[in-house]
Amino acid sequence: MAPVDRDALLTRVAKPARYLGEEHNSIRKDHASVAVTVALAFPDSYEVGMSHLGLRLLYDILNGRPDCACERVFAPWPDMAAEMKACGAPLWALESGRPVAEFDVLGFSLQHELNFTNVLYMLDLAGVPLRREERGTEHPLVIGGGPAAFNPEPMADFFDLFVIGDGEAAVGDLVDLVKRHGRDRAAMLLEAAGQGGPQGFYVPGAYEPAYNEDGTLLGTAAVPSSGARPVVTKAIVADLGAVPYPERPLVPFIEAVHDRVTLEICRGCTQGCRFCQAGMIYRPVRERPLEQLMLLADTQLRATGYDEISLASLSASDYSAIGPLVRGLVAAHGGQGIGISLPSLRTDSFSVDLAAEIQKVRKTGLTFAPEAGTERLRRVINKNVTEEDLLTAVTAAFRQGWDSIKLYFMIGLPTETDEDVAAIAELARRVWRCHETERPNHGFRLAVSCATFVPKAHTPFQWDGQTPRAEIERRQALLRRAMPKRIKLSWHDVEQSILEAALARGDRRLSRVIEAAYLSGCRFDAWDDQFHYDRWLSAFAAAGLDMAWYAERERREDEALPWDHIDPGVSRRFLWRERQQAERGMPTLDCRQGECHACGICGAGPVAPRIVARAAAAQQDDQGEPSSG
């Protein structure tokens, strides 16, 4: 192949800075001086991927090893892909410009299901075969991780290996594994899948699903000859403070979605919202020490020139030293105009007081997430926030000078009624009236955002079907009629939510649907202007499968689920008990407030042993030999 004039190529695309790779604080190593090369692939645009903290963490950790060189690659925008294909340019890594197909490991971050076709898009641009069984020793080891990997089955045909859980806890073992075996893929995967292999490694080729006559899943069990463990337990970082954290983070050339210093103050959440996958799979709660955070803030600000610090967590208000941290950061950096942001606040007066401290430096809006319009439905989803809590919080905010509020809700939650939907508009009206009372002569901006509920794996609602499309659209129309025109109302595209639910609850048969969708032109499915629902419907039909069957069908208690062989630490028994609590409208209080609810994260055994055993028995019947599962 003739050399590609990359500079000339960049003159023909929008935003060429996406593809340069010379950013401040980027790390470039001589590949000849290291034993293992890793390309971290984010299957979305540069602006989105450069905002992702996980990519920055792994980039720093891997490059901190003298035996490893780690580089980045993002999904090229369609204009760039067209130019690359026209001139025969393969997908390259940003730091060295080397084709990613030449790296030892190509690791994808799977943040949500609407990124799935972009994985195939990037493999195709790289010249790497889409399906794992078609790859040879000349191809990189293709691995995936992130929250969407907690149900890896829809993407199982495309990945050699998945990292389940905290990547920081697994990447060291991964590099060591590659060093030991080189390009001997079979030996490497055999060790990774084995009973004595590292925690958190799932090798899909070592497992086989079995199905009932009605199309439901019988179970997924280890292939007898693989020696694979029956259940894959997630990898966990026990002590966040002991894990390296970037002191010189990358600074993108163009504005990223989140373009600021990001400090992860804690990981995990025990609020127990029954719809929230992150709150289940990221348990237990682990905090980063206050002193370390103060030092990191100073170091990162000096290394980047940013003028904002974001305190990242699932529930920042629950960080045990959140008050001293915010006051300390404002005292240390507020005088230089450095702003502080808290992206996740509880609906209470304490959170408003924290925001008021932040407002001393920079004026911001406030965001609260009641999630549901009535207290009945909030009890169902275990969002333990009352209407009084919300009104007290916004009243306190108005008294301290706020004139901009955003409220997040969901439509289509289990047991939702028309009264619950109409109550969203009524609650928004009450917030507006509070502002009129407290700040009658000031303009007010109130925005209400309504997402469509998507049932996710490893949550109490994993058994619940998604509300059908026609009903979601009827409820959205009901809400639009009920909402006062002066309040800005937005909602998610229902077609994207249906697809997300189908993929989130899917089994291994969906691999051929995803491949067909990609080959028909689907990519960047999370972007409204790139999404093609009709092509997805055609891909399901061509595979003889029904999108609604995956998205809307309620599962039985004893039904095997595609992710049962993946153990997030939270037990199936606990999740089912929480679903029963939801049906009764009974809350489950935060376990950090006292009572342990036996979720399993503190020492329970593997999940779903009956289902794993049943799948193994089915395979024994099919193959006529005992199963190690």
Image (cartoon, rainbow, N blue to C red):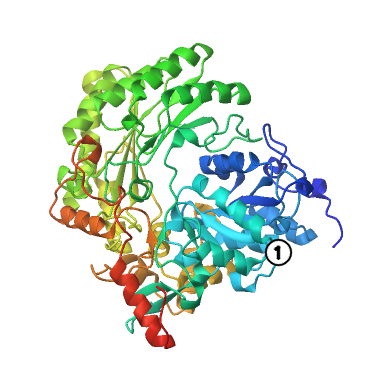
Residue found at the very far bottom of the displayed protein: 624
Q: Residue 302 sits in which quadrant?
A: top right
Q: Is residue 360 left or right of residue 429?
A: right
Tell me residue 164's x, y (percent): 46, 55
Nearer the observer, 156 or 388: 156
Q: Is residue 98 left or right of residue 130?
A: right
Tell me residue 246's x, y (percent): 57, 33
Residue shown at 50%/77% (left/top)? 225
Q: Is residue 381 left or right of residue 21?
A: left
Residue 41 in view, yes or no = yes
Q: Amino acid at mark 1?
A: Gly
Q: Residue 472 sits in which quadrant?
A: bottom left
Q: In the picture shown, does residue 545 fall above or below 44?
A: below
Specify the quadrant that holds the C terminus: bottom left
Question: So how many labels did they put on this image?
Answer: 1
Q: Which residue is mark 1?
A: 127
Residue found at the very far right of the displayed protein: 2
Residue shown at 20%/45% (left/top)? 378
Label 1 secondary element: loop
Nearer the observer, 538 or 181: 181
